[in-house]
């Protein structure tokens, strides 16, 4: 400790002040040396004018020169320098001596923190006087008081002040409570920071301590459930994949819904989260309402996530090592039919189709007697493969039963290493870190290796000039697998679930891959590809290089007037080398097949430049004013190229040079760009920290929009009232914070995937005349010069309430968000030549409540903190195109979703199943499809016209949950800590479209075991929902219907981690600053009724088609052990 | 400066603002007009309307995808994607044509070339409207390009007589201007003969038999077309744009995206590489009824279809499939065959039909017999076809086997008024879901187009 004190006092400082008050000089010094002074203001005359010149001198020398003439002594205590009044009879060598001991009683005592550790430097003041002292390094104090009515006031930075009536006591033991929600804590807002106490808008800070042990390869994943109103949806378990993030519901239909991501001032793509090391992140703040986001104008309408990375601090060099390693496995496997169950089912499906369609048919008819025109009337009876005979019980019992899911999933390892060095002097502060993450995917062969480097440097060139630089290069290399997609396109999961459980993996030679295709032709089964080959025979190496660079210059013209210019550059480029070997079975084609090599690369360079002038002044102690004006311009240049070739001699070399090229090769490239320019201003005003106001305006111009409507203006305002500062509440000691907030503002959206939506473009459409290729150009879209900003207006009312020294802290927000002039790719009559056109049309509302509660339940040696949040969002479309006609959207299989006035955006759309027609009488009694038979699905005649037609399709569900919630409990005792995080959503539905494959009852692909409850006969009607097996589906059974809409609610144990901080004495012995060991489990369990792997899945993530599951890379359960070491 | 900073133009796609200005621009735009012929809704999926809906073919074995089964067995849903495709693609093509016709007059260029381009595009527009009116009945008649999509709301369905009048007008204007033939590099463009033959067919369809006969005779009298001696040669990739070809959709293999998908579309499912490289999808399977329709000794049967194949393991797999279009693709769907829209054989048979409708006459028999003798069949005599009614049936039979899988059968049956009786008579074989009525002679209007403009677009009766 003394070593540290020496280090603090020996650091060099520079200062040049003339005739300023001592308080200001101390402030300057604390900034320059990154230390804090603590003193009793009533004792130290800080208003004294002083002059001080120091140029690169040791701090203790400077302090001696400054303080000795003023009869002030000082002592280093931790991070603080404690100042005391020197009395003639006491010397600096005896700082424990209380001064002015003129009264009759002496009180002694100690001051400790919640953990029972002594706090040195606490100011102890006799209320109503200038008499006081500070605690010594052991936290003890002595003070003389006049009588029993005396009240002592204890205060210290970072802790809640306490008043204690002395009474008859002479010995006091005082515990100061940590001011954790610490209102002096700084919150990052757009283009600046603000004290938490002064926040007027809905801004949430991510509790970084709850993220610390999560073994995630994408930092955004750890945010799940951490902030009220922010939905983080892990729809893909591919290592490193970025989840879908939405703030306060769907704000847009066609333009993006992802919030703006700003990392250290760079506006970046959300995928940057996959390149950030969680340990490098200092803070994440989310701007939720319009008033906070409006400073980002046209880009802020979906909220803003501000990520600040760690920087160096003044003091000795610190070295930190963080390591974790662990194992992941798939959270769930689906129950599919065994070979024996399949044989019975497949036979029934063929027989039913045969009986339906051929008059006079009998199920005993042999295959050759069944018409060849429709081969699915026939089923395997040992004609070609003796072992494949559904009629022979012995053969059925002997069928091999491949558990394809076991063959594609594995236990996979994950490891992460990060080393950082940080430190600084008054001139230069730095942090350099390097990280390496290595993760194998739970689907065999998939993997991720990521290398990250970060260097943050700040330099104080002169007291007025500061410059800084951040460089964050990163590189990742992924082995990709085709996990998703249709089996026909060699999708791994879909083929593993669909392949008949006896479909051969290898041909007779045991080496060459086979597939269901080998069995298919005599029965016209689909040629489902081989899941094992789909993994092994497709190689795709994806590498991505990123560089985030950021430099700034800050000049303080006056103490209150600063100028800051910053320039940011983001470079991002990827390269994919993929090769499909000749050994892979394709849809209906056994190997050898044509090998195909593809190469793709892209490069995106964007820069952002901004200049800000900031004026910050407090007038007459009560009016504080913070003014900001600025400009910003951005530019993005993007290009990509790709090529493919398939004339390979063999599989030895996979790159395209090994191909003969020719007619089977293809190359392509394209480029696009966009630019924006903006001007903005903001005023923050606070009266006595009690009444707060914030007004901002931004004007943006963007290249995305039509020449008539390129510019937009986005104003916003917010007010806050800290009621607890009012006199009538000041004495309610239980109330530590009570703030009412109100905000209203306008923000915009230009996150449109089309770069030039207003231009009438031409597409090429070529032709040939007599075998000569000729180029053709045709209109591709209609112009819309009026195309302009999507506008988002949002009202937010909030309450921050802290009671019992903020041990209970509640934040409640209500918001109403209306988006108008939606950028909509709207259906137009196709007689125009086009089926859709981009317009500003319609109106949508999101409104909801958010509750966040933090409590510190126990604060003794056992601490227990709880944080919980719950958010409700209701989305409703208020207006659409000129005729108000609904937008029907397709995903995978025709129309699945509808967006219509009065309903939530992208609701599921289809038939509503009301049962199964059990017999002919049932069928006769209710409208049905022209092809329906007993055992088929009974759909509701919604429009009651006595027919089942496309007009009977209706709303059958919605993916948006009623509410999302999370609960995190953290405990600590001595060196142990425990954290348990739960997270879930309630009331949302998923359209499990994968059941179109594995619950279609066609008898030609494997099925989930729900088909065991199918209708078999009027006497064996099954579960009343699952129709009969039928190789030629009747009754429109497999139309999109409520049969496949499932409850997507879930509750998940998101993370449990147990850590142990090694005790100080042990560490001292081995020369470590700190050491912590932990075990962490991620995704430990999910409670859900959902039948597919992951209730969060949405393949077609996008507002119009959300919640459609077509088979995606499942999530992993991860258990890791980790170690943090500090040197 | 600020405004120029954010005034960016597309880099990788051209804008219409700086196109349609020169003769060269129009050459490229007219190429784009021809490219519309390959669209699914115009030619690519035309077999669903012309063949699957008829008694000629059945759809592939698919359990849950009933889109083609709906045509085969007549329970076509208003959301059927083939219905959508035909409507949307046709109007997309029409927009291409109208844009050219609206803009070309303002451009100074060689007047004869300009006239030819206009004539070519009008003939294409007539072709697309002819398909539309036969498919849907009354359809919106759009004759100028739109600058905003909202203009589309103004268009309701025009009576089919108006649509036919416009088709006749376009073709009449075109046939006078179009050349009889082109230089080799331009083979495949609409010729005078093609326009006349199409106009003849349009007249025939409207039962204007005398004008039909005279227009088709004009085609014959051009003396540029003839039947090839071998039926098989007509469809060979090496023999494209031969003397029998009056109007073909042009395809080219070689990885340029200009290949013909049909050979792979029509090969049997799960046939691997046994029938065609890269396998097949099993579409448009010949029905047992059609196979039985070939007379013994008809060389056209084996050229047009097969009933089984031998797979890689040596097993004989029973499967009916179309063989007429066959090539060796470099990648799946990249075949070089053209798809005939009008063959000279069709012209001769239409001429015979028109003559017979004007009055029963032996001359008509000579045209029928040219087709039969080429097929290796014996010529019919007046004893075989003693009257007008018998001749009608002879023409119907000959067209069915000669033009099988070329997209004619359903529209032939509708034209001759035979669709209802022929299809209903085979209802057990076809396993019809609904018995055909007059309503089924046109297909439903896409639901999406009704939903978006309910005031103007109404559904056909019965759907």
Image (spheres, coloured by chain):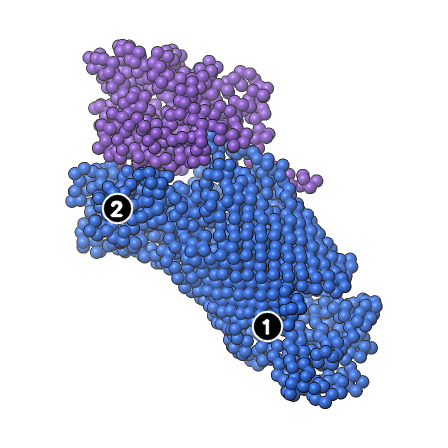
Chain colours: A blue, B purple
Please say if B182 is above or below A1085.
above
Point out residue A362 in the picture as x, y percentages from the top left corner: 16, 42
- Read off the chain for label 1: A
Residue B37: which quarter of the image? Answer: top left
Q: What residue does disc 1 label? A: A734
Q: Is residue A560 visible?
A: yes
Instruction: State the residue in front, A724 or A633.
Output: A724
Numbered disc 2: secondary structure = loop
* Relative side of A153 to A820, left or right: right
**Secondary structure beneath disc 1?**
loop
Is A677 located above or below residue A189 in the figure? above
- Mark 1 crowdedness (10 Å alpha carbons): few <14, some 14-19, many ≥20: some
Question: Percent from the top left, x then y, of residue B263?
Answer: 35, 33
Q: At 43% from the left edge and 50% from the top edge, which residue is drawn?
A: A958
Horizontal and vertical percent position of residue A74: 74, 78
Residue where numbered disc 2 is placed: A917
Q: Is residue A4 left or right of residue A916?
A: right
Identify which residue is drawn at 36% across, 18% down. Answer: B206
Q: Earlier in the sequence, mark 2 or mark 1?
A: 1
Which quarter of the figure has residue A726? bottom right
Q: Position of residue A258 (x, y in %)?
A: 53, 51
Q: Determine crowd level at label 2: few under 14, some 14-19, many 20+ residues with C-alpha closer than 10 A.
A: many
Q: Quadrant of the C terminus of chain A?
A: bottom right
- Residue drawn 69% across the image and 57% down it: A684
């Amino acid at each position: 400790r003394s070593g540290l004190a020496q280090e603090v006092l020996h650091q060099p400082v520079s200062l040049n002040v003339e005739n300023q008050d001592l308080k200001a000089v101390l402030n300057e010094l604390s900034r320059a040396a990154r230390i804090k002074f603590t003193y009793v203001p009533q004792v130290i005359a800080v208003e004294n004018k002083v002059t001080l010149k120091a140029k690169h001198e040791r701090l203790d020398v400077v302090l001696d020169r400054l303080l000795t003439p003023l009869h002030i002594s000082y002592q280093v205590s931790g991070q603080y320098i404690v100042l005391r009044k020197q009395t003639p009879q006491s010397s600096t060598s005896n700082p424990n001596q209380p001064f002015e001991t003129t009264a009759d009683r002496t009180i002694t005592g100690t001051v400790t923190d919640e953990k029972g550790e002594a706090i040195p430097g606490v100011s102890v003041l006799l209320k109503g006087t200038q008499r006081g002292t500070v605690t010594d390094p052991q936290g003890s104090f002595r003070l003389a008081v006049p009588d029993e009515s005396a009240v002592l006031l204890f205060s210290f930075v970072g802790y809640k002040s306490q008043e204690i009536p002395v009474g008859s006591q002479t010995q006091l033991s005082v515990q100061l409570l940590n001011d954790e929600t610490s209102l002096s804590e700084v919150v990052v807002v757009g283009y600046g920071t603000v004290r938490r106490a002064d926040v007027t808008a809905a801004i949430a800070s991510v509790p970084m301590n709850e993220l610390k042990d999560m073994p995630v390869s994408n930092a955004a994943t750890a945010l799940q459930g951490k902030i009220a109103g922010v939905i983080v949806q892990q729809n893909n378990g591919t290592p490193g994949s970025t989840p879908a993030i939405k703030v306060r519901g769907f704000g847009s239909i066609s333009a993006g819904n992802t919030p703006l991501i700003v990392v250290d001032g760079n506006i970046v793509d959300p995928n940057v989260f996959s390149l950030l090391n969680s340990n490098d992140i200092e803070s994440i703040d989310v701007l939720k309402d319009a008033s906070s986001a409006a400073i980002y104008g046209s880009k802020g309408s979906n909220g803003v996530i501000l990520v600040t990375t760690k920087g160096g601090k003044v003091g000795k060099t610190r070295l930190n090592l963080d390591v974790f390693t662990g194992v992941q496995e798939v959270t769930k496997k689906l129950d599919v039919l065994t070979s024996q169950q399949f044989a019975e089912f497949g036979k029934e499906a063929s027989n039913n189709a045969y009986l339906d369609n051929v008059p006079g048919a009998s199920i005993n008819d042999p295959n050759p007697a069944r018409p060849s025109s429709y081969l699915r009337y026939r089923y395997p009876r040992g004609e070609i493969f003796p072992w494949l005979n559904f009629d022979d019980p012995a053969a059925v019992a002997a069928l091999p039963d491949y558990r394809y899911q076991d063959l594609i999933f594995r236990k996979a390892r994950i490891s992460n290493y990060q080393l950082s060095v940080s430190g600084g002097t008054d001139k230069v502060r730095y942090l350099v870190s390097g990280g390496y993450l290595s993760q194998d995917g739970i689907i065999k062969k998939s993997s991720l290796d990521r290398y990250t480097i970060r260097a943050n440097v700040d330099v104080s060139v002169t007291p007025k000039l500061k410059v800084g630089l951040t460089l964050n290069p990163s590189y990742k290399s992924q082995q990709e697998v085709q996990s998703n997609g249709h089996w026909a396109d060699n999708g791994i999961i879909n083929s593993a679930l669909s392949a008949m459980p006896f479909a051969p993996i290898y041909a007779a030679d045991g080496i060459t891959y086979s597939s269901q295709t080998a069995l298919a032709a005599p029965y016209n089964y689909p040629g489902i590809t081989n899941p094992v080959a789909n993994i092994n025979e497709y190689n795709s190496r994806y590498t991505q290089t990123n560089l985030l660079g950021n430099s700034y210059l800050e000049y303080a013209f006056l103490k209150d007037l600063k100028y800051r210019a910053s320039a940011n550059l983001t470079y991002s480029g990827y390269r994919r080398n993929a090769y499909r070997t000749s050994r892979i079975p394709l849809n209906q084609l056994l190997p050898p097949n044509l090998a195909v090599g593809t190469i793709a690369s892209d490069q995106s360079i964007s820069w952002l430049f901004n200049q800000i002038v900031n004026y910050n002044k407090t007038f007459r102690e009560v009016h504080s004013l913070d003014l900001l004006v600025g400009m910003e311009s951005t530019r993005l240049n993007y290009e990509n190229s790709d090529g493919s070739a398939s004339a390979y001699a063999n599989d030895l070399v996979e790159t395209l040079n090994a191909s003969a090229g020719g007619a089977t090769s293809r190359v392509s490239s394209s480029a696009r760009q966009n630019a924006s320019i903006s001007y903005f201003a903001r005023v923050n005003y606070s009266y006595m920290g009690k009444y707060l106001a914030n007004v901002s305006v931004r004007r943006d111009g963007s290249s995305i929009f039509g020449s008539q409507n390129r510019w937009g203006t986005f104003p916003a305002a917010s007010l806050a009232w800290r009621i607890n500062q009012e006199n009538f509440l000041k004495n309610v000691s239980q109330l530590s914070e009570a703030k009412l907030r109100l905000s209203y503002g306008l923000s915009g959206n230009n996150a449109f995937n089309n770069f030039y939506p207003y231009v009438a473009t031409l597409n090429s459409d070529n032709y040939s005349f007599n075998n000569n290729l000729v180029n053709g150009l045709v209109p591709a879209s209609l112009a819309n010069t009026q195309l302009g900003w999507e506008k988002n207006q949002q009202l937010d009312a909030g309450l921050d309430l802290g009671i019992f020294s903020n041990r209970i802290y509640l934040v409640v927000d209500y918001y109403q968000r209306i988006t108008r002039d939606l950028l909509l790719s709207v259906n137009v009559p196709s007689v125009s030549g086009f089926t859709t056109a981009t317009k500003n049309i319609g109106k949508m509302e999101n409104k909801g409540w958010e509750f966040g509660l933090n409590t510190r339940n126990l604060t003794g040696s056992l601490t227990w903190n709880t944080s919980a949040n719950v958010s409700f969002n209701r989305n409703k479309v208020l207006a659409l195109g000129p005729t108000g006609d609904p937008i029907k959207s397709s995903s995978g299989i025709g129309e699945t979703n509808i967006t219509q006035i009065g309903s939530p955006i992208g609701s599921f759309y289809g038939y509503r199943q009301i049962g199964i027609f059990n017999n002919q009488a049932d069928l006769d009694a209710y409208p049905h499809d022209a092809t329906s038979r007993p055992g088929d699905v009974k759909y509701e005649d919604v429009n009651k016209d006595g027919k089942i037609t496309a007009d009977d399709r209706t709303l059958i569900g919605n993916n948006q949950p009623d509410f999302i919630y999370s609960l995190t409990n953290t405990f600590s005792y001595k060196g142990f800590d425990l954290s348990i995080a739960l997270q879930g959503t309630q009331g949302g539905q998923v359209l499990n479209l994968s059941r179109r494959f594995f619950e279609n009852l066609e008898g030609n692909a494997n099925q989930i075991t729900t088909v065991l409850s199918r209708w078999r006969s009027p006497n064996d009607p099954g579960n009343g929902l699952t129709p009969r097996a039928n190789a030629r589906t009747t009754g429109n059974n497999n139309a999109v219907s409520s049969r496949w809409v499932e409850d997507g609610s879930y509750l998940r144990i998101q993370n449990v981690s147990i850590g142990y901080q090694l005790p100080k004495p042990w560490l001292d012995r081995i020369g470590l600053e700190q050491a912590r060991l932990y075990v962490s489990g991620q995704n430990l369990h999910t409670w859900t009724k959902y039948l597919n792997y992951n209730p969060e899945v949405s393949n077609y993530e996008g507002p119009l088609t959300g919640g459609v599951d077509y088979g995606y890379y499942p999530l992993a359960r991860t258990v890791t052990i980790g170690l943090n070491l500090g040197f | 400066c600020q405004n120029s900073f954010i005034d960016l133009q597309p880099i990788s796609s051209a804008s219409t603002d700086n196109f349609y200005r020169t003769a060269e621009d129009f050459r490229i735009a007219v190429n784009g007009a021809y490219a519309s012929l390959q669209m699914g809704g115009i030619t690519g999926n035309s077999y669903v309307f012309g063949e699957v809906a008829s008694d000629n073919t059945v759809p592939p074995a698919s359990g849950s995808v009933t889109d083609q089964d709906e045509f085969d067995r007549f329970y076509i849903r208003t959301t059927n994607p083939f219905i959508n495709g035909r409507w949307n693609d046709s109007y997309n093509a029409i927009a291409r044509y109208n844009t050219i016709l609206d803009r070309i007059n303002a451009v100074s260029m060689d007047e004869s070339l300009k006239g030819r381009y206009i004539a070519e595009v009008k003939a294409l527009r007539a072709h697309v409207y002819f398909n539309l009116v036969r498919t849907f009945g009354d359809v919106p008649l759009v004759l100028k390009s739109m600058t905003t999509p909202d203009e589309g709301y103004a268009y309701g369905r025009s009576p089919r007589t108006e649509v036919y009048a416009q088709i006749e007008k376009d073709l009449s204007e075109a046939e006078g201007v179009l050349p009889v033939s082109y230089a080799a590099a331009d083979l495949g463009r609409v010729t005078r003969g093609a326009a006349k033959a199409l106009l003849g067919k349009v007249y025939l369809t409207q039962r204007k038999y005398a004008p039909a006969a005279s227009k088709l005779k004009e085609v014959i009298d051009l003396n540029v077309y003839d039947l090839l001696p071998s039926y098989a040669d007509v469809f060979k990739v090496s023999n494209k744009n031969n003397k029998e070809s009056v109007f073909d959709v042009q395809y080219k293999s070689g990885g340029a995206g200009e290949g013909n998908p049909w050979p792979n579309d029509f090969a049997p499912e799960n046939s691997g590489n046994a029938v065609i490289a890269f396998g097949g999808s099993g579409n448009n399977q010949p029905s047992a009824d059609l196979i039985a329709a070939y007379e013994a000794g008809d060389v056209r049967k084996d050229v047009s279809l097969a009933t089984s194949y031998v797979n890689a393991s040596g097993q004989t797999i029973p499967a009916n499939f179309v063989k007429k279009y066959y090539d060796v693709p470099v990648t799946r769907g990249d075949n070089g065959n053209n798809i005939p829209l009008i063959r000279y054989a069709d012209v001769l048979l239409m001429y015979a039909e028109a003559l017979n409708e004007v009055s029963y006459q032996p001359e008509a028999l000579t045209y029928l017999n040219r087709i039969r003798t080429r097929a290796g069949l014996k010529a019919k005599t007046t004893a075989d076809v003693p009257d007008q009614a018998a001749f009608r049936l002879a023409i119907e039979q000959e067209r069915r086997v000669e033009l099988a899988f070329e997209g004619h059968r359903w529209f032939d049956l509708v034209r001759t008024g035979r669709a209802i009786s022929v299809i209903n008579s085979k209802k057990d074989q076809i396993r019809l879901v609904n018995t055909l009525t007059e309503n089924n002679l046109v297909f439903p209007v896409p639901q999406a187009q009704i939903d978006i403009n309910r005031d103007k677009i109404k559904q056909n009766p019965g759907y």
